[in-house]
Amino acid sequence: MKRSWSVFRGWPFAGQVISGLVAFFLLAGVASAAAGPPKPTPAKVSTFVATTLPRPTTTEYIAPTTTTEAPTTTTAAPTTTTREYTPPTTEYSPPTTAYRAPVYSPPPTYTPPTTAGSSVYYANCDDARAHGAAPIYQGQPGYRPGLDRDGDGIACE
């Protein structure tokens, strides 16, 4: 029965990586065994010697004193005045402005612009040329798609 390493199925070099790690640990174990048992290291001994050092002596310096009289100031005690609390005599009254309902204004209505071309009508291009209107451009009075043969926006060319 073949053993499947389904965990490493998506890894391209999983077999090489695992075999490399196994070889590394085997060599590390062989190298440490060849070095022999670890050598004992001497134990560290710490010694403490208590010594007493002479203490430095301190001398006190006393500054000469001069006598000056402190200035005398007299401050009057602050005067306090007390007032009794008097509650306000007016009671709350609501504002006197009357409620005004919002004024309804209907939305503006759209009226399409009237074109001046609707008042001029040419039956054909000969009629438009007779009135001196040819050529008629799109948007000008008298233009209509029936007079524009090639549909380029210029009638009666």
Image: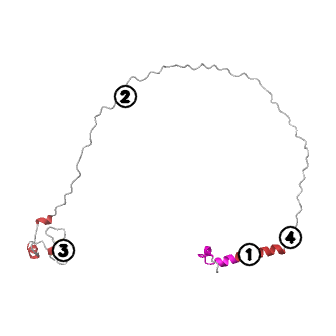
Q: Earlier in the sequence, mark 2 or mark 3?
A: 2
> In terms of depth relative to the viewer, which is nearer, 69 or 82?
82
The residue pinned by badge 4 equals 37
The residue at 67%/76% (across/down) is 17
Per the image, label 3 sits on a secondary structure element best described as: strand
Badge count: 4
Of 78 and 25, which appears nearest the observer?
Answer: 25
Residue 63 numbered tag: none
Residue 58 position, x and y percent, is 86, 36
- Read off the residue under disc 3: 154
The crowding category of the residue bearing disc 2, from other C-alpha atoms within 10 Å (few below 14, some 14 to 19, many at least 20), is: few
User: What is the crowding at mark 4: few (fewer than 14 residues within 10 Å), some, or many (at least 20)?
Assistant: few
Real-space Cα separation, disc 4 to disc 1, in angstroms: 21 Å
N-term mark: 2 or 1: 1
Q: Which residue is mark 1?
A: 24
- 148 lies above or below 113: below
Question: Could you classify mark 3 by the number of other residues whose Cα lies within 10 Å: few (under 14), some (14-19), or many (20 or more)?
Answer: many
Residue 135 image point, x, y percent: 15, 74
Q: Residue at x 78, y 73 (%)?
A: 29
Going from the N terminus, do you reach mark 4 or mark 1 first? Answer: 1
Q: Given the image, on which type of amino acid does mark 2 rest?
A: Tyr
- Residue 13 part of the magenta-drawn span: yes
On the question of residue 135 being in view, the answer is no
Pick the front one: 56 or 133? 56
Instruction: Return the disc, 3 or 1, that comes first in the chain's sequence.
Output: 1
Q: Which image quarter: residue 68?
A: top right
Q: Please provide the residue range marked out in magenta.
A: 5-19
Locate the C terminus and report the quarter of the image it occupies: bottom left
Residues at discs 2 and 4 in contact (Cβ within 8 Å): no
Residue placed under numbered mark 2 in the picture: 92
Q: Position of residue 44 (x, y in %)?
A: 88, 58
